[in-house]
Image: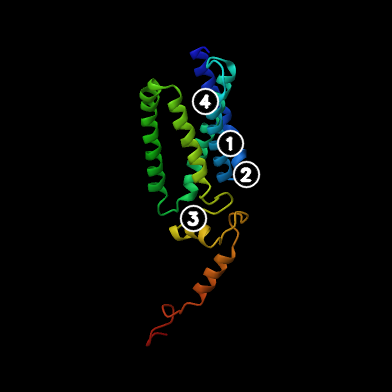
Amino acid sequence: VDPFLYMFLGGLIELPSYTLVVPFVAKYGRKKSLVSFFVLCSIAIMLLLVLPGDRETWYFLCLVLLGKFSITSAYQIIYLYCCELYPTSLRTRGLGLTSMMGRLGAIASPFINDRLGARHWAIPSVIFCCGALAAGVLTCWLPETNNRSLPETVAEVESWNNNNNRSPNNRRGQVTSSDKACEGSDSSMPMAANEPEQGQL
C-alpha cells in the first residue's frame, strides 16, 4: 500500500471518529461506548496478527483503519468521561493527571514500535492489542455518567457504586430520593444559629 495513501486515509478516518461518536455516547452511554471501541480496536489488531496473507493487501489496510477509527473514537470519549467522573473539587487535577499518563503512553509508543518491532513485527501489535483489551475490561468497573448531574464531592462519586443512590435514568435537574433525604436532614438540624440571642428583639 502506498504510504502516502495510507497517511491520507489515516487522517480521513478521523473525521467520522470525531463526529459519529457524539450520538453514539448520547444514546448508549459513556461506559458502554468506551468499552465497545476498546474491544473493537483489540479485535482489529488481533485479526491483523492471525489472518494469513501479505501485509500489503487491502484487507490489511482496512483492519488498520478500523483500529484507527476505534481508538480515535475511544480517545474522544475518554476526555468527556473523565470530566464527568471527577468531582468538581478534583476535576482539574484529575483531568491533568489523566492527560499526563496518556502522554507517557504516547512517549513509549515509538520505542515499542522501533525497538521491539525490530525483533519481530508482531510484538508491538500484541502489546497494543493487550493494552486496548485491558483498558476495555477495566472500564467495566467505572460508573456510568450519562444523564447524571456532575458530582461535586468525592463522596457523591463513591455513592454511585456503593449505595446506587443515583440511577442513570435520573435526568439532570431531577431530585432523587437521596437528595430528598439530604434536604430532610438539613431541615431537621437545630436552628440555634437563626434564633435571636438573649437581649435581642
Which of the numbered marks, if any, corresponds to residue 151?
3
Which of the numbered marks, if any, corresponds to residue 28?
2
Asked if the residues shown at circle 1 and circle 4 are in contact, with their CB atoms under 8 angstroms apart, the answer is no
Q: Earlier in the sequence, mark 1 or mark 3?
A: 1
Foreground pick, 175 / 195: 175
Three-letter amino acid code of the residue under disc 1: Val
Three-letter amino acid code of the residue under disc 3: Pro
| Residue 125 drawn above or below residue 186 | above
Q: Earlier in the sequence, mark 1 or mark 2?
A: 1
User: How far across and how far down the image is residue 182, in percent?
Assistant: 52, 69
Residue pictured at 49% horizontal, 55% vertical:
151
Label 4, residues with CA under 10 Å away: few <14, some 14-19, many ≥20: some
Q: Earlier in the sequence, mark 1 or mark 4?
A: 1
Separation (CA) of disc 2 from disc 4: 30 Å
Tell me the element at label 1: helix
Separation (CA) of disc 3 from disc 4: 42 Å
The residue most toward the bottom is 199
Residue 20 position by quadrant? top right
Residue to which mark 4 is pinned: 49
Foreground pick, 29 / 199: 29
Residue pictured at 61% horizontal, 54% vertical:
171
Separation (CA) of disc 1 from disc 2: 10 Å
Q: Nearer the viewer, mark 2 or mark 4?
A: 4
Q: Earlier in the sequence, mark 2 or mark 4?
A: 2
Label 2, residues with CA under 10 Å away: few <14, some 14-19, many ≥20: few
Which of the numbered marks, if any, corresponds to residue 21?
1
Which of the numbered marks, if any, corresponds to residue 79?
none
Tell me the element at label 2: helix
Label 1, residues with CA under 10 Å away: few <14, some 14-19, many ≥20: many
Three-letter amino acid code of the residue under disc 4: Leu
Separation (CA) of disc 1 from disc 3: 23 Å
